Image (spheres, rainbow, N blue to C red):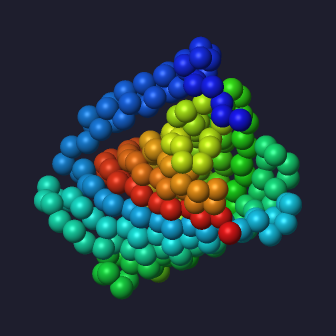
Amino acid sequence: MKNQDPFLHPHTSMHYTKAITFYIFLLMWVFSGAQESFRALAETSIAINHKVSKNYNVNFATRSRSFLYRNQTLQYQQQQLDIFHFSTLVLDYSHDLSFGIYYRNRDIFDTGSDELRLTQQFNYKKQKLGVRFGHRFRSEQRFFNDRTVFRQRYRFTIDFPLNGEKLDIGELYFVSSLEGLLNLSKPDIPEIDQRTTVQIGWQLTENLKLQAGLEYRLESFNVEAQNNLFVLSSGILKI
C-alpha cells in the first residue's frame, strides 16, 4: 500500500526540511572558500551488487574521472580509470564488515602514478521515520610507484525518500554525506581532507538505481588547500 504524503507527517517533514536546508547552506559555505586552487571534475561509475547468501554480499565497480576545469581554464582531459571489488560480511541488519581491493590506472593518461589499494571497512546504520543514518569507518593502504599512504576515513551519511517514508519503484530519494580523511605517509607530514556530497537518486526498477549530484573536496587543508568540485553520476545494479 502506498505511504501517505510526508507532509501529513509533521516530524518526518521537519527532518527532510532541516536536512536539505543544512546541506544547501553547507555547500554554499565550502564553495565560497575555493580560490585559485579550484578544479572541477566529472566522475561516472557503474556498480554491480550481488547477494551470494544471507550474510555475504559482493560488489564490483568501475569508475571514470575527467578534468573539466583546472588552472583557471575550461578543458576536458581523462584523468583515470578505476576498477574495484568489495566483499561484505553482514553481521546483522545494522552492522557489516567489508574488505576491498582497488586498482587505479593513471599511467595510460599520463596524469600520475598507478595505484593498488587495500581496504577494510565497518558500517553501522539505523533508520527512524523513514530517514536512514549511516556511519562508515574505513582504513586504506594505498600503494603508489614511489610511496605508500595509510589513510583513515570516517563518513556520516543520511538518506530518505522524497515521497513518503518508504521508497517505491519510480520514486526519488535524497542522499548526502560528510567525510573526514587522514593521510599518513613518511616522510611527509599528515594531510587532512574533508568531503561533502549531495545527490538525488532514482529507484528506476527494483534492481536498478541512478544517482547524480555534487561532491566538494577540501584536500590537504592543513598543508596547502586544494578545492575540487566533482560532478557525480552513477548507476547501481543488483543481480
Residue most toward the bottom?
108
Left or right: 105 with respect to 42? Answer: right
Residue most toward the front?
1
Q: Residue at x 64, y 56 (%)?
A: 206
Left or right: 100 with respect to 61? Answer: right
Please state which of residues 32 and 202 is positioned toward the viewer in this rendering: 202
Q: Name the image quarter holding residue 108.
A: bottom left
**Numbered label tally:** 0
Q: Residue at x 30, y 81 (%)?
A: 110
Residue 25 sits above or below residue 145 on the image:
above
Left or right: 152 with respect to 122? Answer: left
Q: Name the image quarter holding residue 208.
A: bottom right
Residue most toward the top?
10
Query: Looking at the picture, how far across and down is residue 189, in whole percent?
Result: 46, 54
Q: Quadrant of the N terminus?
A: top right
Residue 219 sits above or below residue 160 on the image:
below
Residue 5 sits above or below residue 80 on the image:
above
Q: Quadrant of the C terminus?
A: bottom right
